Amino acid sequence: MTAVDLTHGLDEQADAPIFEARDLVVDYHSRGQVNRALNHVSLSIAEGEAVGLIGESGSGKTTLARTLLGLIRPVHGQVTFRGQDLYAMKSIPRYRMLGRDASLVFQDPRSSLNPRLTVGAVVRDPLTVQRIGTRAERTDRVAALLESVGLPAQLVSRPVRALSGGQLQRVALARALAVEPGIIVADEPTSALDVSVQAQILNLIQQVRASRRLALLVVSHDIRVIRYLTDRTAVMYNGEIVELGSTARIHDDPQHEYTRTLLASVPSLKR
Amino acid sequence: MTVSTRIQPHRVDDGGGASTSTLAISDLTVRFPKRYGDVAVLDGVGLSIGPGESLAIVGESGCGKSLLGLAAANMLPPTAEVGGQIHFRGRDLYRLRGRERRAVRGAGIGIVYQDALTSLNPGMSIGAQLRQVFRLGSPYTPSDLLDAVGLPDARILKAKPYQLSGGQRQRVLIALALAREPDLLIADEPTTALDVTVEAKIIELLQRLQAELDFALLFISHDLAIVSQLCHQVAVMYGGQLVETGPTAEILTNPRHPYTAGLLAASSSLDEGHGTLATIPGFVHPPTEFPSGCRFRDRCSHAQDDCAARPVLTDGPRRLACHHPLTSTDGGPR
Ligand SMILES: Nc1ncnc2c1ncn2[C@@H]1O[C@H](COP(=O)(O)OP(=O)(O)OP(=O)(O)O)[C@@H](O)[C@H]1O
Ligand SMILES: Nc1ncnc2c1ncn2[C@@H]1O[C@H](COP(=O)(O)OP(=O)(O)OP(=O)(O)O)[C@@H](O)[C@H]1O
Ligand SMILES: [Mg+2]
Ligand SMILES: [Mg+2]
């Protein structure tokens, strides 16, 4: 492994961790070949903290996010969620615990939400699965959630397929917020959206975080999105975290060569 | 890749007088009668691109960018009803039949589709897919082609699409589109979802190949920053209509249409990166809910009563369709 000062980044977090990943190794197997997607990765996320994950395509960002969420068993290492060792738990209690407290938002809402369901059904689903509230309470909660993400109430009975991309990502966010999770993990939440709609969604995420304590792990290939949303950034390259520290520091004073290349490649209107 | 001799483009009359455009579109209208009745999903679009020139089409999702690209390649779905003219090297594209039509689609126009990552054959190795175009008359061997797009690795030839990263697949598609030295390359969002380092390489590659091969480039994107690096001219679309066109540098520094200014403000406020980001309120309506007159007017802070009548697109090097354009002192983003 490359020698990187990872303790520096760890010092900067104040609160107890909500997620803690220690020394994760994840391998994918295909046709007898082994592809190491995570190579001894450690990362912790404090309560209420926003962490960004940036890095080259194929560097393991999605794999790390999915491993944290209990979806990929690492061959080595440990993930704890609020102090509980995830992969020491049986899968049903594991999904139950995470389903109540950690939500996932995907890149492309059109392929991650069932197009035939109504908006109301999509947002209500996690409440039903987690048996939160009575029927009537769930209906009220769905209405409140749609309002909080800026969607008109009459959309509740519309099928998902009739919505624009930006509206859909709002629905995905309302769904993610339904269980009042401690953390949202968002994998490329705005890269399928236009700049104007992206700005609407980013504003919305900031607005939610200002109104309640919510930790965030954002995966993005756009450093501007990471810079806007997060306090700390982990830079991944080839299955490893090669740089970890405050987002401002990484932006102003990148240490790793890949981070420098990344920053130098950001297209800008100012030339 | 080296440049071979090419046929000089024919002169065409694209309505604005004789020119030597590779692609000249005038008054293009597309309807889907079954789905949207009489609404024109592309409405009176006119533009042209010459050899070595590059034109960007920008606008939010659903504004008709991909439809315009498909129309220019004569690849609209059969359910589309098309009006107006599209001339490719002086020939009316929609009057071509049989062999001629296939020749233009195969060799004259290269297209990188928006859903690029699914448009490679999943069961066939990259080498086999490249050999197919070679047999169809590409002057380049598969390894020439991969070299040209910066993928010299022999491993790539043997690989199936799923064994390549997103950026590698994207470059293979560009190689396929350029294999038969088209006079027109249509690239529909060829870099979305790639990380910026790969994106920068692809943009450089397009620039280099265009300088070498002198094709006309129709580049579809919603990313103004990328457009500003790659394209001479930009055409801003909203609701299937052109709202503002002109030289990229001018449009980006001095937008006159409130929609253009809104796109720019959203983009540059993310560049600055703090506070509440600038947005354009509302969203693009589906075609059946387009407002009459200016289709942007219900989202526009400058709109007044007269916007219920359709603004005319002016003529000249900078064209604009707006009753209440910004003056340069209104700024727009700095
Ligand atoms: N199901 C799978 N089977 C085999 N290999 C896989 C699988 N999923 C991912 N990989 C490989 O694991 C590595 C990491 O992939 P991952 O999806 O985590 O990358 P990423 O950083 O999210 O990339 P991107 O920015 O392109 O989304 C890549 O080399 C990828 O090809
Ligand atoms: N085959 C089709 N049949 C009916 N309507 C269509 C068809 N293709 C596109 N449309 C409609 O035409 C409009 C323009 O679509 P288009 O795909 O050109 O948008 P776009 O600007 O490329 O958007 P994006 O940025 O999302 O790719 C949309 O309202 C779309 O629903
Ligand atoms: Mg990923
Ligand atoms: Mg499109």
Image (cartoon, helix red, strand yellow):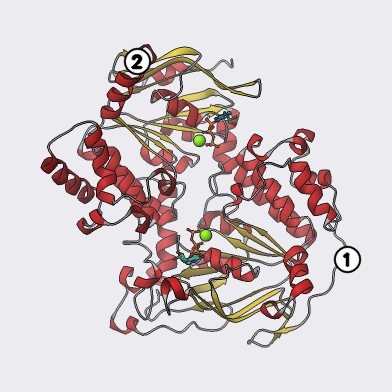
- Residue to which mark 2 is pinned: A90
Residue B318 in view: yes
Residue labelled 1 has its Cβ within 8 Å of some atom of ligand 4: no
Which residue type carries mark 2? Lys
On what subunit does the disc labeled 1 rest? B
Percent across and percent down for residue A223 are 47, 40
Marks 1 and 2, how far apart at CA:
68 Å
Instruction: Name which quarter of the figure residue A135 lies in.
Output: top left
Which is more toward the observer, B231 or B133? B133
- Relative to residue A245, is residue B169 drawn left or right? right
Which residue type carries mark 1? Thr
- Residue to which mark 1 is pinned: B5
Residue A18 in view: no
* Residue at screen point 60% across, 29% down: A257
Classify mark 2: residues with Cα within 10 Å, few (<14), some (14-19) or many (20+).
few
Percent across and percent down for residue B121 are 67, 46
Percent across and percent down for residue A250 are 47, 31
On what subunit does the disc labeled 2 rest? A
Which is more toward the observer, A261 or B222? B222
Name above or below for residue B9 compared with residue B218. below
Name above or below for residue A22 compared with residue A188. above
- Relative to residue B4, is residue A67 drawn left or right? left
- Ligand 1 positioned in quadrant: top right
- Relative to residue B94, is residue A38 drawn left or right? left
Which is more toward the observer, A135 or A154? A135
Q: Secondary structure at mark 2?
A: loop
Q: Secondary structure at mark 1?
A: loop
Which is more toward the observer, B217 or A72? A72
Quadrant for the C terminus of chain B, please. Answer: bottom left
Nearer to us of marks 1 and 2 is 2
* Residue at screen point 49% across, 82% down: B313
